[in-house]
Amino acid sequence: MLNSGQNFDLSNSPRHRQMSTKGARAILHLDLDAFYASVEQLDAPALHGRPVVVAGPSSRSVVCAASYEARKFGVRSAMPTVRAKKLCPGGVFVTPRFPRYEEISSRVFEIYRRFTPLVEPLSLDEAFLDVTTSESLHGPGRVIAAAVKRAVKEELGLTVSAGIADVKLAAKIASDLGKPDGLVEVPPGTTRAFLEPLPVSRLWGVGRVTEKALARLGIHRLGQLADAPEALLAGALGRGHARDLRTLARGEDPREVVADEEAKSVGAEETFEEDLVGREALLPHLLGQAERVARRLREVGKKGRTVTLKVKYADFELVTRRCTLPSATDDGHVLFQAARAQLERADLCRPVRLTGVSASGFQAGRAEQLELFEPSPDGLTAATS
Ligand SMILES: [Mg+2]
């Protein structure tokens, strides 16, 4: 694992000097440091500088967040509280106050939106910002990131770590490498070299199973994954997964930042009476949600291309996973298949209190489409947006 002291200045690498940086996007990934624990320290100044552990009160509960002082004792998120107490007997253990975290989070996001409307929240403490078109007004991505950090610190007293890159993947890794209070930039055109030395586990979609499968092929670093023959990878991981991972390892990540307000979506969600654990328990709910979304889409004559799965864990951490379909749909089964695939990208070992499925990225349904689009000469319809 790399630490934040590592030097990521790759600008002297000849391979990267020759790459074009024209038209590069500027994407920030912003991640508040030890968020819940920091809010507790903020609200109770006596806790400042002390090891604070936010965890449920029951003996079966797990740690939601640990301040950096507590992390020095080895305390980590998702660790059983009992174990955390053994590691850090002098720690201050506090029960989570989610309404307060949500309130502070929305104030942080208000600050982000001063710099760009393109803010995509990932959870209460994490977001992507696309600042490409803000650069003429606010300066380069790095300058914007510094300004955001300063505003959050001055106005709310919290530190946020920032990663800046031209793709989401690299921005997210960069923010993590700099923690806490980090600001790590991956200059345009240097993404591949930035990724090369990192362990494969840094990639989204590489869990323990995939990591082991790659290790059996002698692949440990992203540079090796990027250069591996596709047939070799496909044999171990399956064709689709192999291709996706290799593409990401090469720093190719076209995913866009999708602003929250833009997501004019149709969704269905439910909070379970009891927390559910595992795929088998969750899938029937996803199916029901997908079918409700499909019915609603048909009612309003719309079809969605983007399918988003929302999973809220028992500790209230919210994750969203989305994918784009080859074509827009209002078919419940297609939506369910997409949601099910996204579920595989969530942590299925943790108890879940809520799931939701939504469709966005609308295209008009068939009747409207015929009016909106003239058939092109080869008989296909051409969508203009
Ligand atoms: Mg965080």
Image (tube, rainbow, N blue to C red):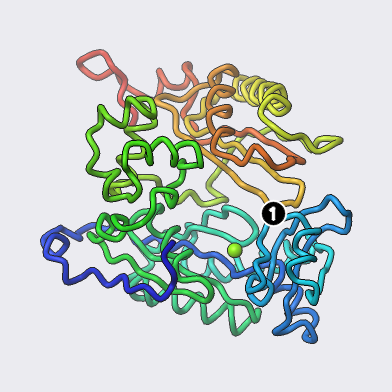
Q: Residue at x 51, y 65 (%)?
A: 30
Q: Nearer the viewer, residue 43 or 139?
A: 43
- Residue identifier under label 1: 78
In the figure, 219 relative to 109: above or below?
above
- Residue type marked 1: Ala
Helix, strand or loop status at disc 1: loop
Q: Position of residue 113 (x, y in %)?
A: 53, 65
Which corner quadrant holds the N terminus? bottom left
Q: Nearer the viewer, residue 301 or 226?
A: 226
Residue found at the very far right of the displayed protein: 58
| Image-quarter location of ligand 1 | bottom right
Q: Position of residue 339 (x, y in %)?
A: 57, 29
Q: Residue at x 50, y 42 (%)?
A: 207
Quadrant of the image occupied by residue 247: top left
Q: Position of residue 235 (x, y in %)?
A: 33, 25
On the rendered structure, is 156 left or right of 186?
Answer: right
